[in-house]
């Protein structure tokens, strides 16, 4: 399994790795040393919490490095009237008789609460590559789906989008 990432996603991941290695790792090691100095390690909650934080940081670094190593690079370029990665899309939801606005992003930046939908989600898969004015069927599962109409597409900057952590 691999993640589809843009070149910008890779750069953001590299920056997070660098920050975690140079800043967070140093702070975590200091916290462990300080907690260790407080005495009996078997009953020292601060020591165990500091070790857990240090291990969590190291785990995140390994995860990000593996993600970069196994990533499939995808382009975020698209035609002006075509839905692509990093485009803000206005959709007309036929079932609800409402319009909704979403930004189509890669999996690591998906956040439905913030209106960013992944290209791997049912909606993202359905609208990716489609043009303004098209009516598209979104298959949620084998038994259910719905139609949307693409009202507009706008290319937007992704510099503020955050990589989803844990």
Image (cartoon, rainbow, N blue to C red):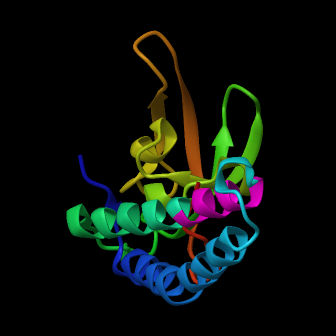
Residue 79 at x, y = what percent?
Answer: 37, 74
Please say if 39 is above or below 29.
Answer: above
Q: Identify which residue is drawn at 46% across, 36% down.
A: 122
- Image quadrant assignment for residue 29: bottom right
For the C terminus, the image quarter is bottom right
Q: Between 85 and 68, which is closer to the camera in this rendering?
A: 68
Tell me where residue 28 sits by quadrant.
bottom right
Residue 110 location in percent, x, y?
55, 55
- Residue under the image location 56 percent in, 51 percent down: 117
Locate residue 47 relative to residue 60 in the image: left or right. Answer: right
Secondary structure that dominates the magenta span: helix
Rendered image quadrant of residue 46 = bottom right
Looking at the image, which residue is at 64% across and 82% down? 30
58 vs 46, nearest the viewer = 46
Above/below status of 95 relative to 32: above
* Count of picture labels: 0
Residue extending farthest bottom: 22
Depth check: give the residue in front, 120 or 27: 27
Q: Which residues are magenta?
A: 45-54
């Amino acid at each position: 399994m691999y993640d589809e990432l843009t070149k910008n996603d890779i750069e953001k991941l590299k920056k997070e790795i660098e920050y975690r290695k140079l800043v967070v790792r140093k702070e975590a090691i200091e916290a462990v040393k300080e907690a260790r100095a407080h005495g009996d390690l078997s009953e020292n909650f601060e020591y165990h919490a500091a070790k857990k934080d240090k291990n969590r940081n190291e785990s995140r670094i390994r995860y990000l490095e593996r993600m970069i190593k196994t990533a499939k690079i995808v382009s975020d370029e698209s035609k002006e009237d075509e839905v692509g990665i990093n485009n803000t899309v206005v959709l007309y939801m036929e079932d609800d008789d409402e319009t909704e606005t979403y930004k189509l992003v890669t999996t690591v930046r998906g956040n439905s609460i913030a209106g960013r939908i992944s290209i791997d989600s049912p909606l993202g898969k359905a609208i990716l590559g489609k043009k303004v004015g098209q009516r598209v069927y979104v298959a949620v599962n084998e038994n259910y789906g719905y139609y949307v109409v693409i009202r507009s597409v706008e290319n937007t900057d992704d510099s503020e989008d955050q990589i989803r952590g844990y």
